[in-house]
Amino acid sequence: MTVIEKGEINLYQKIIYFDDGSITLLYISKGSDDVIALKTSGLSLSKPRQSRMDILAKMLMDNKAVYDKYKANGKFTFKQIRNIVHLYNTGHPLMNH
């Protein structure tokens, strides 16, 4: 796994390659070594999408401005997740890369 955001909230990315493509997985952790599967480009994860969105929301709750931005946006894309975690960790939006 590759760490793509490091701070109070850590975001990890794992890419699994197959002969005919790949699947990207995002994992998240905050304040512990427990890593939770948050998003996949594959078919599904064990927890429903709303449940995974709530996991991220709970991690953001102690920063009201970031939490409110996440809830107002309502998006749960790979890019949006990375942007909101970066904003939480640094106080600055993620620059396009």
Image: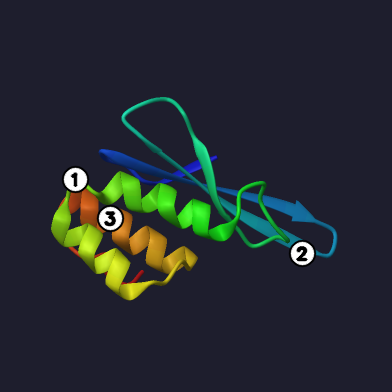
Q: Amino acid at mark 1?
A: Asp
Can you say which quadrant of the picture contains the N terminus? top right
Residue at image coords 39%, 51%: 56
Q: Is residue 91 visible?
A: no
Measured as percent of width and height from the top left, residue 47 is found at 61, 48
| Farthest top residue in view | 33
* Circle nearer the viewer, 3 or 2: 3
List the residue tagged with mark 3: 86
Q: Is residue 35 visible?
A: yes
- CA distance for labels 2 and 1: 38 Å
Is residue 8 left or right of 82 when viewed as pictured? Answer: left
Residue at image coords 45%, 57%: 53
* Circle nearer the viewer, 1 or 3: 1
- CA distance for labels 3 and 2: 28 Å
Other-residue count near label 3 (Cα within 10 Å), few / some / many at <14 / 14–19 / ≥20: many
Other-residue count near label 1 (Cα within 10 Å), few / some / many at <14 / 14–19 / ≥20: few
Q: Amino acid at mark 2?
A: Gly
Measured as percent of width and height from the top left, residue 21 is found at 77, 64
Mark 3 or 2, nearer chain start:
2
Can you say which quadrant of the picture contains the C terminus? bottom left
Kindly state the secondary structure of the residue where label 2 is placed.
strand
Kindly state the secondary structure of the residue where label 3 is placed.
helix
Along the line of sight, which residue is nearer the eye, 24 or 63?
63
Other-residue count near label 2 (Cα within 10 Å), few / some / many at <14 / 14–19 / ≥20: few
Picture colour scheme: rainbow
Check residue 21 in the rendering and tell me which mark sits there, or answer none: 2
Measured as percent of width and height from the top left, residue 66 is found at 21, 59
Is residue 29 left or right of 66 when viewed as pictured? Answer: right
Along the line of sight, which residue is nearer the eye, 75 or 22?
75
Q: Amino acid at mark 3?
A: His
Residue at image coords 23%, 68%: 69
List the residue tagged with mark 1: 62
